[in-house]
Amino acid sequence: ELCQSRLILALDAYYYNTYDLLLNRPLPGSIGFGSVDANVGELENKGLELGINAVIFDGDQLRWSSNFNISYNQNKVLELYQDQPITNQGRGNNAVIVGEPIGVFYQFKSLGVDPSTGDLVFEDVDFNNEINDEDRQVVGNPNPDFTGGWTNNLQAGPFDLSVFLQFVYGNEIFNGVRQYAENMTFAESDNQLASVKLRWRAPGDRTPIPRIDGIYNNDITSHFIEDGSFLRVKNVTLGYNFPKQTISHWGLSNLRLYLTGQNLLTFTNYSGLDPEVNYSGVGSIRRGTDFFTFPQARMVTFGVKLSL
């Protein structure tokens, strides 16, 4: 029996402006302090949220329900104190810039490794044949385009199964681990990743890994920015409910055994341990940076639930 009538769709749209954001306003160096906290920002958020709840099959021995949700959010900084950008925030050089999403990565844009020298090459924004602070630009966005989840619940006789999938799409991560463990500059104090075996060795080599002790190996650049999109099997629970006729002889009204797994599988192109991490915790600006951050644990739990 296909329950076409048991379908609920919900679509929400929103537009919200936040005024007087508390941010670090830059100060002239002559004052003796680099910045001061002040209410100087205005931020725009707009987006869509879609939810679908459905009972796909509802029989005597089998029931299948499904819940899907997806959210799209776009934010943009509308105003700062005298439109002065706030840069160099955190290890990934996040920034707050008028006209850009909050927390964007403001760095040198890497164009790859020069086959003739083995050094990283960056985009010369002002065309003065010199790479300096004026050549930094927005090179990445830690804010995802879409986030969502999909839950399926099945019940077959005394057995029940719940599977929750989580996904994030369109965000970028600054892999600060690679900045230390792939730069071949701090080799005496930091172990290096196996990827350094692909490093540039001789003129003519074409490789994404620069030479040992390259000029820009340790700089904060887009060379270490990666796609942070992922699909994760967040939670799976399998349960068994004992028949009431059986447990009534034991003085019980309900008895259920269950096995739960969390963070079982993650599908991603991100090379780090976990795409769902941030070294500075939950923050509005310092986001999307991985720096030896402990990944979310994979856990398996067995439990018993009973009622008298």
Image (cartoon, rainbow, N blue to C red):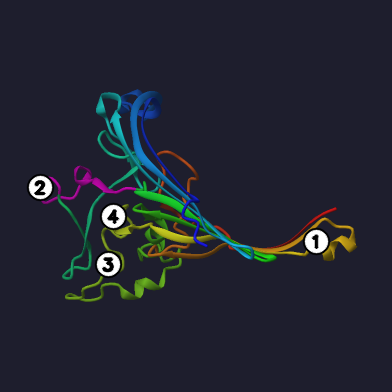
Q: CA distance from mark 4 to mark 3?
A: 14 Å
Q: CA distance from mark 4 to mark 1?
A: 61 Å
Q: Nearer the observer, disc 4 or disc 3?
A: 4
Are circles 4 and 1 on residues that touch, CB within 8 Å? no
**Which is nearer the N-term, disc 3 or disc 2?**
2
**Residue 180: which quarter of the image?**
bottom left
Please state which amino acid type lies under the numbered disc 2. Asn
| Element type where label 1 sits in the image | helix
In the image, what residue occupies the spot 43% across and 62% down? Answer: 272
**Which is nearer the N-term, disc 4 or disc 1?**
4
Q: Is residue 42 magenta?
A: no
Q: Which residue is mark 3?
A: 210
**Which is nearer the N-term, disc 1 or disc 3?**
3
Within 10 Å of the Cα at label 4, are there few (<14), some (14-19), or many (20+) other Cα atoms? many
Are circles 4 and 3 on residues that touch, CB within 8 Å? no
Q: Which residue is mark 4?
A: 222
Considering depth in this image, is 12 or 145 the residue closer to the camera?
12
Magenta-highlighted residues: 125-141
**Which is nearer the N-term, disc 2 or disc 4?**
2
Q: CA distance from mark 2 to mark 1?
A: 81 Å
Q: Is residue 147 left or right of residue 108?
A: right
**Which is nearer the N-term, disc 4 or disc 3?**
3
Please state which amino acid type lies under the numbered disc 1. Lys
Please state which amino acid type lies under the numbered disc 3. Pro
| Residue 235 appearing in the image | no
Q: Nearer the observer, disc 2 or disc 4?
A: 4
